[in-house]
Amino acid sequence: MTEPRKPETTRPIPTVKPGEGDAREVTRPTGVMKVPKATTQTARQQTLTGLTGRMDLRKITRSVETTGMAKHRRYVEKMKRKANVERLSQESDRAERWSRQQKVVLLVLMIAIGAASYYKVQSAYGNQWPIMTIWIAVVIAVLGCFFWTIWYIDKGDM
């Protein structure tokens, strides 16, 4: 078998001292770059919760967050709250509209049933109605008014 091929030898890297005419030398003075404190490695404290060893991401993101990020987060939370308020308002309006429509339909239905009953009895008996039919109609009307009055008094949203 042949021996594995050895890499070709390269020349050694020369050591260059600053000020000896190196082309890579910095000609302008450089200052110390100031890094915001919130983005330094020491500010990224990772806290553990419980015995499971999972990281609490809320605490980590709060410690890494800059002022611009915090402002944007507050803005997003404000928009979410505004959207929730709008959604609740629309749901309330929709429920109120449905309740109003339901009341109108029931009222029209009751009037139609009453009118149809009157015309049916009138066409069957003419002007000589049987007394029992009149008593049944009066009892139903009085009980209906009584129960509607109780319902209306107990209604809490008026």
Image (cartoon, grey):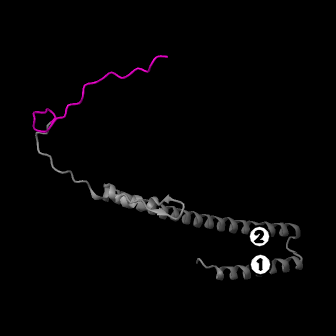
Range of residues picked out in magenta: 1-24
Q: Position of residue 145 (x, y in %)?
A: 73, 80
77 sits left or right of 101 in the view: left
132 sits left or right of 25 in the view: right
- Give the image quarter of residue 25: top left
Depth order, front residue of 96/47: 47
For residue 145, above or below residue 18: below
From the image, tell me which residue sits under label 1.
141
Q: Do the numbered discs 2 and 1 sit on residues whose CB atoms are within 8 Å? A: no
- Give the image quarter of residue 3: top left
- Give the image quarter of residue 26: top left
Label 1: how many Cα within 10 Å (few below 14, some 14–19, many 20+) = few
Label 2: how many Cα within 10 Å (few below 14, some 14–19, many 20+) = few
Depth order, front residue of 55/62: 55
The kind of secondary structure element at disc 2 is helix
11 sits left or right of 50 in the view: left
For residue 123, above or below residue 151: above
* Residue at x-position 89% and y-position 79%: 132
Q: Position of residue 146 (x, y in %)?
A: 73, 82
* Residue at x-position 88% and y-position 70%: 125
Per the rendering, the mark at residue 114 is 2
Q: Position of residue 97 (x, y in %)?
A: 58, 64
